[in-house]
Image (cartoon, grey):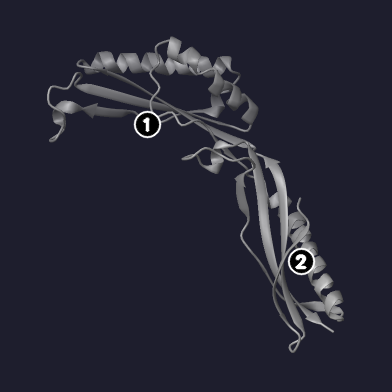
Amino acid sequence: GGLIAYGLIDARTGDRIVTVRGLAERDAKADLAILPLRFTRSGDDLAAVQTAIDGDVTKVRGFLAAQGFKPTEIDLGRLEVLDNNAREYGPQNARARFILGQTLVVRSNDVDRVQGATRNLSDLVRQGVVLQEFRGASYIFTKLNDVRPGMIKEATASARSGAAQFAADSGARLGGIRSASQGSFEINSRDPVSDGQSADASVQKRLRVVTTITYALK
């Protein structure tokens, strides 16, 4: 964690107070991964397209089982059905009347396993599964409450260090806390992400909190 003085906001010798900010930072690893896999089939015979999409569900489940995921970690999403002939402003002479889309969602605390599965998705493509709109997995840090007290303590110590230095430089002694406020916790990617990517695309996180504290000066 970072334990540095984040900056002096205000110092009024007349009121004998000093207001400073304290910063705390920590690196953490995501502990929850969510991987949606959406695939489609199209054709003019609805029953045949449904059979094909059911076959793809079996293939995807088999792939995920081979990657080590348990059935309880795999959720079947809703089935999407598009009938081009039923669309008032649909495309003329569409190549296929029906387009069916199905999504399976992997939700696992084993983020390393999810990363490995995303690298092996070419196996599904070779089986004829047409993945659509694939954006990768989302990696989430859910244990903020476990680190919150320690980070607030670090940020407070950081603020006090800055205030004590100001007091020493001004020939005063640092008194008690007059007021304090905690900024919101931020969970960002530890490393830079590509344009258009969110912080959820990164497994490694950077946790950050800033406190603002006003001390009395004696």
Helix, strand or loop at label 2? It is helix
Answer with left or right where residue 103 lies relative to residue 96. Answer: right
Tell which of 44 and 27 is nearer to you. 27
Helix, strand or loop at label 1? It is loop
Is residue 74 depicted above or below 191 in this figure? Answer: above
Q: Which mark is residue 218?
A: none
Residue at image location 78% in from the left, 56% down from the top: 3
Residue ranking furthest to the bottom: 14
Residue at image location 73% in from the left, 56% down from the top: 24
Q: Which mark is residue 159?
A: 2
Q: Are marks 1 and 2 in contact (CB under 8 Å)?
A: no
Q: How many marks?
A: 2
Q: Please state which amino acid type lies under the numbered disc 2.
A: Ala
Q: Please state which amino acid type lies under the numbered disc 1.
A: Arg
Answer with left or right where residue 64 lies relative to residue 217. Answer: left
Residue at image location 77% in from the left, 59% down from the top: 4
Mark 1 sits on what residue? 78
Quadrant location of the C terminus in the rendered image: bottom right
